Amino acid sequence: MQFTAMILSNVEVSPGYWRMRMTAPPECAASRPGQFVMVRVNGAIDPLLRRPFGIFDIGTYTPAQSGAIPQPYLEMLYRVVGKGTAMLSTLHGSDLLDVLGPLGKGFDLGSPAEEKLIVGGGVGLAPLYLLAKELAQGSEVRLFAGGKTRDDILCITEFERLGVECYTATEDGSLGECGLVTEALLRRLDQLQGGATIYACGPHGMLNAVAGIAAERGIPCQVSLEGYMACGVGACLGCVAPGHSHSPDTPDFRCVCTEGPVFESGELKWRDRP
Ligand SMILES: Cc1cc2nc3c(=O)[nH]c(=O)nc-3n(C[C@H](O)[C@H](O)[C@H](O)COP(=O)(O)OP(=O)(O)OC[C@H]3O[C@@H](n4cnc5c(N)ncnc54)[C@H](O)[C@@H]3O)c2cc1C
Ligand code: FES
């Protein structure tokens, strides 16, 4: 669905990271954790292509007018990396945005009896908050958030408010443990009594490591990919990722925007693994 959203707020939550709230049509209330939107960052020709962003949160707000009824909103958490995201960061309340979505296949919430281990790297936390919100209603949820420095660890208080136990790790030791967040994940897996599912989003190196850990231990793992996208609706094939049986002789590709962005980690081809 294509809609015009009005920005309600656009706030820098950490240096270079912004959280934007916008109005959304009632249909967006049914967005699934892991789905995304394609946003035209302005009405001009450049940048031409929409930019993809995970849905950080959905909810309702009550407009200021007296007697107003609650209206749906949608939130994105984004990092300024180039022209499009820099333009987004200059927008203010009451500016309008052209949005397409919700798009793609989200996370499978699995059985409430299993422990849920959520792993996020930097802005990879963006699609994991709505996931945590839904999972925390019936399951024990732990979040493992990693980044290069403390500035990359985003919105942890919001996760804690959901009752999620949070572990943080930074490569420079400026927040939480010094090192990679996968080390804390491994320690938790060593203590695990029953079943668990891993959900991850972040840089490809982190996803590669998490997929390897899950495969070695036979734990179900879903990953959300954040590669390049042009159309977001399956028309250009610009977003494809190699599937598990891909080789130069037998091409096997997955269309990230329509078959993903969330995949079972075993569906994909990972570095260093057959
Ligand atoms: C399904 C999906 C969900 C996403 N969700 C989020 C989100 O919630 N929050 C968020 O901040 N970002 C998210 N991204 C990434 C986001 O779409 C890009 O950062 C954004 O399009 C960059 O636009 P730009 O015009 O600012 O950068 P550009 O000017 O297009 O590029 C600037 C630099 O960033 C690099 N770059 C651009 N896109 C990507 C990318 N996808 N991965 C790695 N490097 C890239 C370019 O190579 C270039 O070096 C998501 C991507 C996908 C596919
Ligand atoms: S972005 Fe065009 S097919 Fe996925």
Image (cartoon, rainbow, N blue to C red):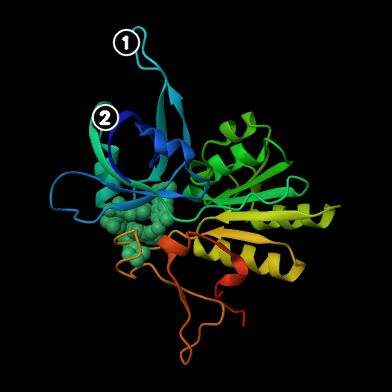
| Quarter assignment of residue 71 | top left
Quadrant for the C terminus, please.
bottom right
Question: x, y (%) of residue 8?
Answer: 33, 27
Residue type for callout 1? Gln
Residue at 53% from the left image edge and 36% from the top image edge = 155
Compare marks 1 and 2 and give the one earlier in the sequence.
1
Residues 105 and 227: in front is: 105
- The correct choice, above or below, for 53 with respect to 273 in the image is above
- The correct choice, above or below, for 192 with respect to 62 in the image is below
Asked which secondary structure carries label 1, the reply is: loop
Question: x, y (%) of residue 128?
Answer: 55, 46
User: What is the crowding at mark 2: few (fewer than 14 residues within 10 Å), some, or many (at least 20)?
Assistant: some
Residue designated by label 2: 92
Residues 174 and 137: in front is: 137
Residue 101 lies left or right of residue 205; in this view the side is left
Residue 211 lies left or right of residue 194; in this view the side is left
Residue at 48% from the left image edge and 89% from the top image edge = 250
Residue 172 visible somewhere in the drawing: no
Question: x, y (%) of residue 83?
Answer: 24, 51
Question: What residue occupies the far bottom of the structure in this picture?
Answer: 249
Ligand 2: image quarter: bottom left
Residue designated by label 1: 65
Residues 223 and 91: in front is: 223
Asked which secondary structure carries label 2, the reply is: loop
Residue type for callout 2? His
Q: Nearer the viewer, mark 1 or mark 2?
A: 1
